[in-house]
Image: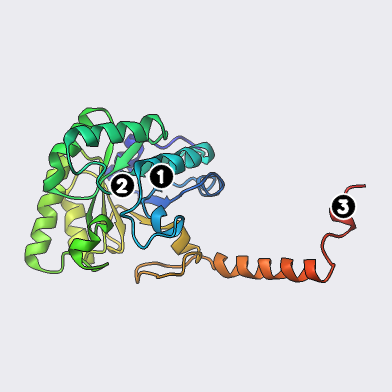
Amino acid sequence: MSKKTVLTILEKKHIGEKITMLTCYDYVTAKLISSQDIDALLVGDTLGNVKLGYENTLSVTVDNMIYHTKSVKRGNAGALLITDMPFMSYEITVEDAVRNAARIVKEGGAEAVKVEGGIEILDKVKAISDAKVPVVGHLGLTPQAINKFGGFKVQGRTEEAGEKLIADAEALEKAGIFAVVLEAIPGQLAKEVTERLKIPTIGIGSGRYCDGQVLVIDDMLGMFTDFTPKFVKKYADVGNTIKTAVKNYIDEVKEGQFPREENTYK
């Protein structure tokens, strides 16, 4: 498998080949996912929900992101490694944005960072990009703005909101991002954004017209059941498989069926 880079992702848009991305938070999962030649692994701040048990992503820290990025890096067999910049690690000042992006790359081993927001963060995006750290944008339902949105709600449904999202996407492209995640927006709006931009769009709950797709690994494997967005397709039921395996283990230990001779040293 060839190593995927920023240029790989850009070239896929040019030749019309779909881009594949999944979230990932640990060494073992990184080995499994990247063995299938996936294009990109995203160490998402969704780890706040699916790994740390928080109600949302707002409590996640830069140190959390670095810790999990290092783990994924060790198991990654060639996917482009992208890491989310968590809430308030880039919004306040340009200096904070560049410093924290640099930490995620230098200490964590990320090859790119992802930030949420549009025109209001252009100076931070440009500064990070100018510091030689590739940047992915994120528009639509941006989970770090959940309190502003009043919950996890579809975005871009009005003409005004759609026009703003398009303007944000075009401005981010000019500021230096090499791709943009479009989350929970109408499919036709995602199609228009995709056609307008020279850089790839990665959809999550935004229809089939994006240049690629991303899902949270714990959602698509049926492991995280606190809530399941409409746009998730479950490709496996690993959660129930684990429950069954654990129950069988408990039963066998209690009944004296495990360990057996083949599990015991001579």
Q: Earlier in the sequence, mark 2 or mark 1?
A: 1
Q: Earlier in the sequence, mark 1 or mark 3?
A: 1
Q: Where is 212 relative to 152, above or below?
A: above
Q: Where is 190 relative to 2, above or below?
A: below
Using the numbered discs, state the Cα–Cα distance from disc 2 to disc 1 in whole angstroms: 9 Å
Position of residue 85 measured from the top left corner of the image (x, y, whole percent): 30, 44
Residue placed most toward the observer, 26 or 189? 26
Q: Rate crowding at label 1 as few (under 14), some (14 to 19) or many (20 or more) other CA atoms within 10 Å.
A: some
Q: Rate crowding at label 2 as few (under 14), some (14 to 19) or many (20 or more) other CA atoms within 10 Å.
A: many
Badge 2 vs badge 1, beta-carbon distance below 8 Å: yes
Q: Residue at x 28, y 45 (%)?
A: 13
Q: Earlier in the sequence, mark 3 or mark 2?
A: 2
Asked which quadrant contains residue 205, the reply is bottom left
Q: Where is 191 relative to 30, above or below?
A: below
Q: As shown in the figure, which amino acid type bears the numbered disc 3?
A: Thr
Using the numbered discs, state the Cα–Cα distance from disc 3 to disc 2 in whole angstroms: 47 Å
Residue placed most toward the observer, 230 or 66? 66
Using the numbered discs, state the Cα–Cα distance from disc 1 to disc 3 in whole angstroms: 39 Å
* Residue 184 falls left or right of residue 60: left
